[in-house]
Amino acid sequence: MNEEQIKYKVQKRIVIISGLILIGKFIAYFVTNSVGVLTDAMESIVNVVAGMISLYCLRWGSKPGDKEHPYGHGKIELISASVEGILISIAGGMIIYEAVKRLVIPAEVEKLDIGIVIVAVSGVINYLMGYFSIKTGKKYGSMALVAGGKHLQSDTYSTVGLVAGLLVLYFTGINWIDSVLALIFGSIIIITGISILRNTISGLLDTADDKLLEELAGLLNDNRQPEWVDIHNTKVIKSGNCIYMDCDLTVPWYYTVSEGHKAGEKLKNVLKEKYNDKIQLTLHLDPCDIFEKPKCDTCIFDSCKYRKTSMISANKITLSSFTLNESEMDN
């Protein structure tokens, strides 16, 4: 079973279990007439709808690149996560509206003991599903699974507070506590939705991922080849679990095309050993400018026949040098 099939299978299980939880929570709401329980039930609707969208997007995103989509279809996972963030925020707004309405027009809350048990059990299940979804998503680079898992876990955190509040309501009989709980957790749900949207918007706009760039720079430092005089002008785009990387590799100026190609292949092999087929590298070769801007004092290529000065200190690949473009290098 490949990675895409694993992600799809995980999400399919989450959707089925979320559907069962949804039914249980609405049973709890109709039994108790608690607006607090209703907040949990409404968020479960979002869980199921967003889960189904993620399921579709995971299947679509697993398709390989084609003529119309040369970088594959992985970006659809970000669209899925964005939709989930929007739905979460809308659900939070609806919950707050219902809470305010219940404050103005109070209603009797009944049979809280049954509702508390159902909500508590569903919270534990949601947390476990969220943990497994996030773990799988991080392992296979799926933004949709990570976003879905965070949503499920935020549902659990609100459930813990909701159960605590319902217990207070159960023992005190103060009905307005029910509405206050809905207001608090409706706000938490909205904040969660906005957080997911911010992350997915960054992905859709291809915001530079400094953490990934630093990881790549560290990997190349650890596997540095003598003929890699410099690596710069690096750009990285993530699409689903795929990484598309462009960079310039500086090699000795007297290298033939064949020798330069071999140096580039070594770099590709280092990346593929770490990321397997999830990374695609587009490489541009530059000759070292030994006559106008020599780098001999930082070059580790000891066997160079045209070295002008001895090496003083090796130039370590850093985030700033790794992403430096040609115009910045000239300045």
Image (cartoon, grey):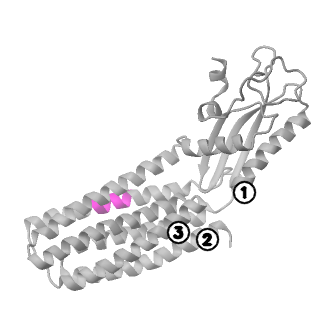
Asked whether, in this view, residue 23 is left or right of residue 108, the answer is: right
Choose the circle earlier in sequence order: 2 or 3. 2
Q: Is residue 235 above or below residue 287?
A: below
- What SS does tag 1 mark? helix
**Residue type indicated by callout 2:** Ile
Three-letter residue code for mark 3: Leu
* Residue 6 is inside the magenta segment: no
- Judging by the rendered image, the residue that carries numbered circle 1 is 276
Q: Which residue is mark 2?
A: 6
Mark 3 residue element: helix
Q: Position of residue 322 (x, y in %)?
A: 64, 34
The part of the chain drawn in magenta is 86-93
Q: Residue at x 55, y 41 (%)?
A: 210
Q: Which mark is residue 25?
A: none
Comparing 145 with 53, the one in front is 145
Q: Position of residue 107 (x, y in %)?
A: 10, 75
Q: Nearer the viewer, residue 302 or 127?
A: 302
Q: Is residue 164 visible?
A: yes
Callout 2 touching callout 3 (CB < 8 Å): no
For mark 1, does the 10 Å Cα neighbourhood hold few (<14), some (14 to 19), or many (20 or more) residues? few
Q: Quadrant of the C terminus?
A: top right
Report, in whole angstroms, how far the alpha carbon at label 2 lies from the one at label 1. Answer: 17 Å
Q: Quadrant of residue 256?
A: top right
Please tell me which of labels 2 and 1 falls first in the chain: 2
Spatial distance from mark 2 to mark 3, Cα to Cα? 12 Å
Q: Which residue is mark 3?
A: 55
